[in-house]
Amino acid sequence: SEHLHNEVLKAVRDACAGIPEDEDEAAVDVVKVAMVQGFLATDRRFLAEGHLRGGATATTAFLRRGRLWVANVGDCRAVMCEGGTAKALTHDHRPDKEEEREAVERRGGEVVKILGTSRVQGVLGVSRSIGDRDLKQYITAAPEVFSLLVSNQSEFVILGTDGLWDVVGNQEATALVAAAVGSVPGGRREIAAAYLAAVALVRPPGRPRGRRVPHRRLA
């Protein structure tokens, strides 16, 4: 996560260096491209570590002068609380979604359902990720990037993994955060994050856990 943070922040800062502060619209596409570059740079760095065989999903956000950008790969998700209502800002990249399945198939891969979960080559439960070198020819580390203006109704954003979203719905998650922060004077995000994690840990899994199915289980 530290490498992704550094790569995305560097790419965004470099891209925005030549944009005047008052030209907000000019930054929309520039930042989107920069965030994609940051994810791909992180992927290259991950793959350069020859001993790393797994992979990771991720989501990140960037705020500039009242505009928010969010980017994600895999089933990490960004959810905003806006006027008390949960609003998903990203799409989960799972192989059972038509666009994601077609992208995998265009690259020569296939989507196989294992124990009720669609997986790339019967192994990987997401269609985009950082790393996963043995399946890289079928998937991508390029994120989807979404941009929106924040308003007076925009309260906070939750960046979470499937470990949270598989067992806690968007609306419930925003309500839990609002309650956690509101229960402590000067409530801090660390308290809310710890509370969400604690709730998720005691819930039974909503779908088969694990990004991968070990190859030996495919026989």
Image (cartoon, grey):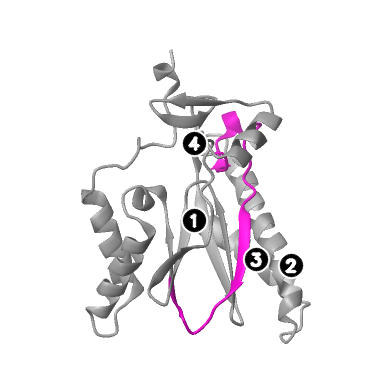
Considering only order in the chain, which callout, 3 or 4, is on the residue closer to the N terminus?
Answer: 3
146 is within the stretch colored magenta: yes
Q: Residue furthest right?
A: 18
Q: Nearer the viewer, residue 18 or 82?
A: 82
Q: Which residues fall within the magenta stretch?
A: 127-156
Q: Which residue is mark 2?
A: 30
Q: Is residue 64 left or right of residue 55?
A: right
Which dot marks residue 145? none
Q: Which residue is mark 4?
A: 54
Q: Which residue is mark 3?
A: 10
Name the element at disc 4.
Answer: loop
Label 1 environment density (alpha carbons within 10 Å; few <14, some 14–19, many ≥20): few
Residue at the image position 53 percent from the left and 81 percent from the top? 151
Instruction: Using the rendered view, name the quadrant where residue 210 is placed.
Output: top left
Q: CA distance from mark 4 to mark 3?
A: 25 Å
Name the element at disc 3.
Answer: helix
Q: CA distance from mark 2 to mark 3?
A: 13 Å
Q: CA distance from mark 4 to mark 1?
A: 15 Å
